[in-house]
Image: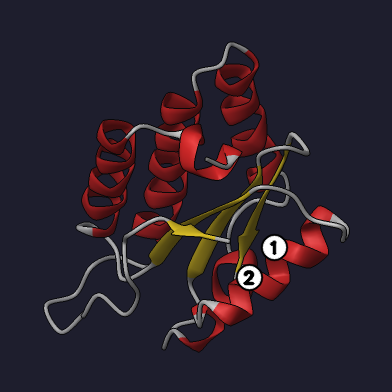
């Protein structure tokens, strides 16, 4: 079994998917988590590739957020699409990464991901509030590579 499959238990995965669902309840934004074993690329570059592969650049308001993890490399990246990056404070993603990294350092990956999802959701809600006509444009499931 690869490290990706061992990284989170089914229960932890369900808790993360639920955190995404709850965060997206209040916003038109889209949040995804992608986990893979390793990457030979610069983590940010690979995260951008995954962002496009998952169709996150196709959201109507350009307000998708991807949390990308390369488990074996001990790297993670948060990327937001153009719409969200234009409105959040310039240090927002770094501050979110710091909150997540604090949990990751103690081995609490589930809580780190949930904290990052909540923070992203709060910003999305602030700038992209939910409207009755909104649809869930992307899956909430964790993708794996």
Asked if residue 73 lies left or right of residue 59, the reply is right
What's the mark number on residue 47? 1
Image: 18 above or below 39? above
What's the mark number on residue 139? none
Asked if residue 124 lies left or right of residue 16, the reply is right
Label 2 sits on a secondary structure element that is helix
Image: 1 above or below 143? above
- Can you give x and y, in whole percent of width and height, for residue 93 in the image? 65, 46
- Can you give x and y, in whole percent of width and height, for residue 74 in the image? 74, 34
Asked if residue 127 lies left or right of residue 82, the reply is left
Image: 111 above or below 132? above
Label 1 sits on a secondary structure element that is helix
Residue position for label 2: 50
Compute the Cα span from label 1 to label 2: 5 Å
Residues at discs 1 and 2 in contact (Cβ within 8 Å): yes
- Can you give x and y, in whole percent of width and height, for residue 26 in the image? 23, 57
């Amino acid at each position: 079994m690869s490290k990706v499959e061992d990284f989170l238990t089914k229960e932890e995965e369900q808790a993360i998917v639920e955190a995404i669902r709850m965060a997206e309840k209040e916003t038109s934004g889209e949040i995804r988590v992608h986990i893979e074993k390793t990457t030979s690329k610069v983590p940010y570059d690979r995260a951008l590739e995954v962002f496009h592969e998952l169709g996150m650049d196709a959201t109507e308001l350009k307000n998708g957020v991807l949390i990308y993890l390369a488990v074996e490399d001990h790297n993670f990246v948060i990327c937001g699409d153009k719409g969200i990056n234009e409105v959040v404070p310039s240090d927002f993603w770094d501050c979110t990464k710091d909150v997540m990294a604090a949990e990751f350092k103690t081995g609490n990956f589930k809580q780190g991901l949930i904290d990052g999802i909540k923070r992203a959701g709060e910003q999305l809600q602030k700038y992209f509030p939910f409207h009755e006509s909104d649809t869930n444009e992307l899956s909430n499931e964790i993708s794996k590579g």
